[in-house]
Image (tube, rainbow, N blue to C red):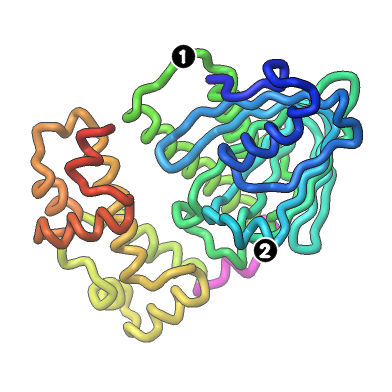
Amino acid sequence: MLTVFDTATVAVPERLPAWRDIVAASLVPTAVDSPDPATFTARLGAVPLGAAQVTSLAYTSLWARRSPKEIRCSDPEYCQVGLIRSGRQGIAQDGVSAVIRPGELVIYDSSRPLEAVSAGGPSPAETIVLQFPKRLLPVPDHQMAGLCATALPGTEGIGSVLAAFLAALADSRTCCTDRDALRLESIAVDLTTAVVAHHLERENPPLRSPTRTLYLRIIAFVEANLHHPELSPDAIAAVHHISLRYLHRIFQQHHAVTVATHIRTRRLDRARQDLADRRLDHLTIAAIARRWGFPRPADFSRAFRGHVGTPPRDYRNNT
């Protein structure tokens, strides 16, 4: 992992201000202070993974607060997952608080006020943070809120798989290509989704209701049929023998976006992966667009640019 910042290179009076600046640039704007600025030390390393990022942090005693003011100033709408490697960290969000110990995971939301404190010790506390746009996580905000600022096990079950993945990235000294980074981004989001789903199912039995089961079947059906141009809310309702109105009601209950928006977003995500895959360089952009349900190149180009922020040709050439 590339070291982006180390207080050892900064004069003592400038260390805290410099740390605030690097945290704002690499993570999100946050008010940071230390009980002993004269002895404060910290370092930060980062690995970009497409729209995601894994950041390794080490710091002596500090407190951090992300207030509504910082959120109004800048909110990238990130889901953030912390893995505590050493030390203990107190965290509070949405009226929930916990002390996170080494080996444990914690999830928090950049769009909600947050307070965190690290008491420090003889050596700096160490944390790994994974962050990615919330839109990549197929879980509604109101369900995610129930897991925020809660200690989740990172040494057993599915949590240990995510923790090992994050630790391996943080400890790696090899550089990955842009295309590798995009593949790792997908793995990071999928592992986070698996951890979230596991804990939601364990803590909230109603998720296994008949409606929830039908919703999961529909999501799986959509994922398996994204390449079919005729995939639409009407077609989904017909295949599952429900009315279109009932389909929309299910999505209102269990998803953050409409059926059509979900289909469009997943198609664009798949197209983005294909454009970054060197093995598919023989396919034209129009062919990839058709492959994921966009028969008109102009419509695909416009939708892709709105989703990713750059035209598909530029994205392909620069990854």
Q: Position of residue 82 (x, y in %)?
A: 67, 39
Position of residue 297 in the picture relative to residue 65 (left or right): left
Whether residue 260 is visible to the viewer of this picture, yes or no, is: yes
**CA distance for labels 2 and 1:** 41 Å
Q: Main secondary structure of the magenta part?
A: helix
Q: Answer yes or no: do the residues labelled 2 and 1 have beta carbons within 8 Å?
A: no
**Between 21 and 91, the one nearer to me in the picture:** 21
Whether residue 144 is visible to the viewer of this picture, yes or no, is: no
Q: Which amino acid does the dot numbered 2 rest on?
A: Asn
Residue under the point 48% across and 44% down:
189
Residue under the point 48% across and 68% down:
256
Q: Is residue 185 above or below residue 14?
A: below
Image quarter of the N terminus: top right
Q: Is residue 283 above or below residue 56?
A: below
Position of residue 307 in the picture relative to residue 140 (left or right): left
- N-term-proximal mark, 2 vs 1: 1
Q: Position of residue 18 (x, y in %)?
A: 68, 32
**Between 66 and 252, the one nearer to me in the picture:** 66
Q: Is residue 96 above or below residue 24?
A: below
Q: Which amino acid does the dot numbered 1 rest on?
A: Thr
**Between 250 and 76, the one nearer to me in the picture:** 76
Q: Is residue 152 above or below residue 162?
A: below
Number of residues whose C-alpha sits closer than 10 Å to that of mark 1, classed few (under 14), some (14–19) or many (20 or more): few
Q: Position of residue 200 (x, y in %)?
A: 63, 57
- Disc sitting over residue 204 in the figure: 2
Position of residue 174 in the picture relative to residue 9 (left or right): left
- The residues colored magenta run 201-211
- Disc sitting over residue 174 in the figure: 1
Residue under the point 65% across and 32% down:
128
Q: Secondary structure at mark 2?
A: loop
